[in-house]
Image: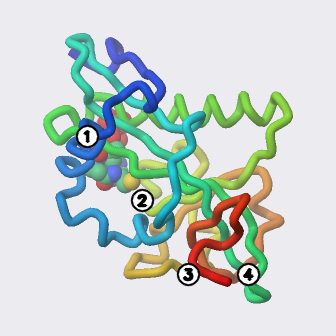
Amino acid sequence: MSADTATIIPLTAVEPAMIEELLDRAFGADRHARTAYRIRAGMEWLDALSFAAIDADEMLVGTIQCSPIALIDNDARPVPMIMVGPVAVVPERQGEGFGMGLMAAMLDAEARMAANGSPSFPQVLIGDEDYYGRWGFNANATSGWRCPGPYEQHRLLARGAALSAMPRDGSLGPWNPEGGIVGKD
Ligand SMILES: CC(C)(COP(=O)(O)OP(=O)(O)OC[C@H]1O[C@@H](n2cnc3c(N)ncnc32)[C@H](O)[C@@H]1OP(=O)(O)O)[C@@H](O)C(=O)NCCC(=O)NCCS
């Protein structure tokens, strides 16, 4: 069996407890302390950009979630971005193409929304450029960006047409388009 037989469905169709269990298996139960979790702390994932992979036996094998965040520039102005992740495939099914299928579904959805007139925000993640580079993610724009916790700067990757207009320096953190910068006055 392979990802050729995978079905990609909206993540909203999956029981929340099953998503949590899958994430615990892919990242470990201590995953909430990770820097990526701190960047998007308190943010709901975006329904339109979050998906699950189901195999031919209708088993949940992977998920991708995206959340609204912002790069807060040195003048405390938030510049909206999309945080990609977690991207997770259950350990025994990794390397079968499910991760690529989930990434493609998310990027297709993002492109369709942009084509239909929705604002297109740059995407950011913490991950390996060897993997995410195939979708245009790289660390070229991120050397002056900071994260709330430990991370390797070369693994802070971004992509998107609007990247060239992003501030060179700033801090990544949760951002609610309606409520402003989360955790700040
Ligand atoms: C990273 C992850 C999502 C990739 O999904 P996957 O279904 O295992 O990967 P795919 O089958 O889609 O892709 C396989 C290809 O990517 C490569 N690849 C996978 N992970 C990689 C990594 N971290 N760095 C470089 N290449 C990687 C494989 O070598 C393989 O290459 P090939 O096609 O040339 O043989 C998955 O392995 C996973 O859940 N890992 C644990 C959680 C994690 O680290 N998530 C990413 C951070 S959010």
For label 1, the crowd category at 10 Å Cα-Cα, with few meaning under 14, some 14 to 19 and many 20 or more, is few
Please give the label number shown on residue 146: 3
Percent position of residue 93, x then y: 20, 32
Front-most of residues 155 and 111 = 111
In the rendered image of this protein, does residue 131 appear above or below residue 97? Answer: below
Hey, what amino acid is under mark 3?
Answer: Arg
For label 4, the crowd category at 10 Å Cα-Cα, with few meaning under 14, some 14 to 19 and many 20 or more, is some
User: Any atom of ligand 1 within 8 Å of the CB at mark 4?
Assistant: no
Q: CA distance from mark 1 to mark 4?
A: 36 Å
The answer to whether any part of residue 6 appears in the image is: yes
Hey, what amino acid is under mark 2?
Answer: Gly
User: Any atom of ligand 1 within 8 Å of the CB at mark 2?
Assistant: yes
Q: CA distance from mark 4 to mark 2?
A: 23 Å
Q: Who comes first in sequence, dot 3 or dot 2? A: 2
Tell me if label 3 and label 2 are in contact, CB under 8 Å. no
Residue pictured at 47% horizontal, 80% vertical: 148
Q: In the picture provided, is 127 more to the left or to the right than 22?
A: right
Q: Locate ligand 1 by image quadrant.
A: top left
Question: Secondary structure under badge 1?
Answer: helix
Front-most of residues 43 and 5 = 43
Give the residue at mark 4.
73
Hey, what amino acid is under mark 1?
Answer: Ala
Residue pictured at 52% horizontal, 43% vertical: 134
Q: CA distance from mark 3 to mark 4?
A: 10 Å
Colour setup of the view: rainbow
Hey, what amino acid is under mark 4?
Answer: Asp
Quadrant, the C terminus: bottom right
For label 3, the crowd category at 10 Å Cα-Cα, with few meaning under 14, some 14 to 19 and many 20 or more, is some
Q: Who comes first in sequence, dot 4 or dot 2? A: 4
Please give the label number shown on residue 17: 1
Please give the label number shown on residue 154: none
Q: Who comes first in sequence, dot 3 or dot 4? A: 4
